[in-house]
Image (spheres, grey):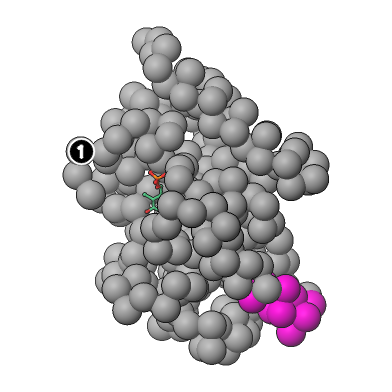
């Protein structure tokens, strides 16, 4: 199967990321692309993989399991769980993903740690921060972040890699930067507090705010629509 539309949009997104890094005065390889494939069929993921994409983000555990089974032959694919996670589904993420970006409570972290199979090595964790102070969005508050980070850093089967945020949508590029500045500063202060933690990841920036996120130091941008097109269901 060849899909010229996917090939074109993936190329365009790579060019956008490269241009954003250049504009920010950052090296070409300073941020990588996470392709958010929720609601999209396994065949599209396989096609993106053929085009060189390796890291994919999923939001729904059962949907992700089905696609992982279909794509089991792609042994260098890296699965990231990026959606809200109910504690009773933590085992699926512990056993089937390399990363989770949405840890926002200690109870969830402890379950993931206990359920992570030793053979897979530690699960890479980003803590999701509620950066826009919106009651509706998930994520831990900045005030509660240090305690959660210390707890996660102490769990042997988790690797605390950094922070993730989903700011409230906003069209103005200067306004878009503000929550990303707060997330970057939060990561910087965690690095001071936990100097031994491998805190190298700022998971921020989506299809509509990639440039603002890269300007403020994003190392992993999560793009869905810009690569795979609009989604049918939320
Ligand atoms: C869906 C989703 C994305 C991708 O959003 P787009 O606007 O389609 O690029 C990124 N991050 C998270 C956490 C998501 O749920």
Asked if residue 27 is positioned above or below residue 172 in the image, the reply reads above
- Residue 125 in view of the camera: no
The spot of residue 74 in percent (x, y) is 49, 29
Magenta-drawn stretch contains 191: yes
Magenta-drawn stretch contains 172: no
The spot of residue 193 in percent (x, y) is 74, 84
The residue tagged with tag 1: helix, strand or loop? loop
Quarter of the N terminus within the rendering = top left
Instruction: Please give left or right for residue 91 compared with residue 202 in the image.
Output: left
Q: Residue furthest left?
A: 233
Image point (71%, 61%), residue name = 200
Image point (62%, 60%), residue name = 202
List the residue tagged with mark 1: 232
Q: Is mark 1 within 8 Å of ligand 1?
A: no
Nearer to the camera, 65 or 169: 169
Asked if residue 69 is positioned above or below residue 8 in the image, the reply reads below
The spot of residue 103 in percent (x, y) is 46, 71
Q: Quadrant of residue 30?
A: top right
Image point (63%, 67%), residue name = 181
- Mark 1 surroundings within 10 Å by alpha-carbon count, few (fewer than 14), some (14 through 19), many (20 or more): few
Asked if residue 225 is positioned above or below residue 95 in the image, the reply reads above
- Residue 210 in view of the camera: yes
The spot of residue 136 in percent (x, y) is 29, 73
Image point (33%, 66%), residue name = 85
Q: Which residues are magenta?
A: 186-195
The chief SS type of the magenta part is helix
């Amino acid at each position: 199967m060849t899909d010229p539309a996917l090939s074109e949009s993936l190329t365009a997104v790579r060019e956008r990321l490269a241009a954003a890094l250049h504009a920010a005065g950052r090296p070409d390889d300073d941020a990588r692309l996470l392709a958010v494939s929720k609601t999209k069929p396994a065949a599209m993921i396989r096609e993106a993989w053929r085009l060189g994409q390796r890291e994919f983000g999923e939001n729904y555990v059962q949907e992700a399991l089905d696609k992982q089974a279909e794509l089991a032959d792609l042994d260098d694919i890296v699965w990231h769980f990026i959606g809200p996670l109910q504690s009773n589904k933590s085992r699926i993420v512990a056993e089937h993903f390399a990363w989770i970006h949405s840890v926002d409570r200690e109870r969830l972290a402890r379950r993931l740690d206990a359920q992570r199979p030793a053979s897979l090595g530690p699960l890479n964790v980003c803590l999701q921060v509620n950066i826009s102070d919106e009651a509706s969005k998930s994520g831990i508050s900045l005030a509660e972040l240090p305690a959660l980070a210390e707890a996660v850093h102490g769990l042997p089967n988790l690797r605390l890699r950094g922070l993730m945020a989903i700011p409230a949508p906003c069209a103005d590029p200067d306004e878009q930067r503000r929550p990303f500045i707060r997330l970057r500063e939060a990561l910087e202060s965690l690095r001071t507090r936990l100097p031994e933690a491998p805190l190298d990841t700022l998971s921020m920036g989506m299809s509509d705010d990639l440039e603002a996120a890269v300007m403020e130091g994003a190392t992993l941008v999560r793009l869905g629509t810009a690569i795979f097109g609009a989604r049918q269901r939320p």
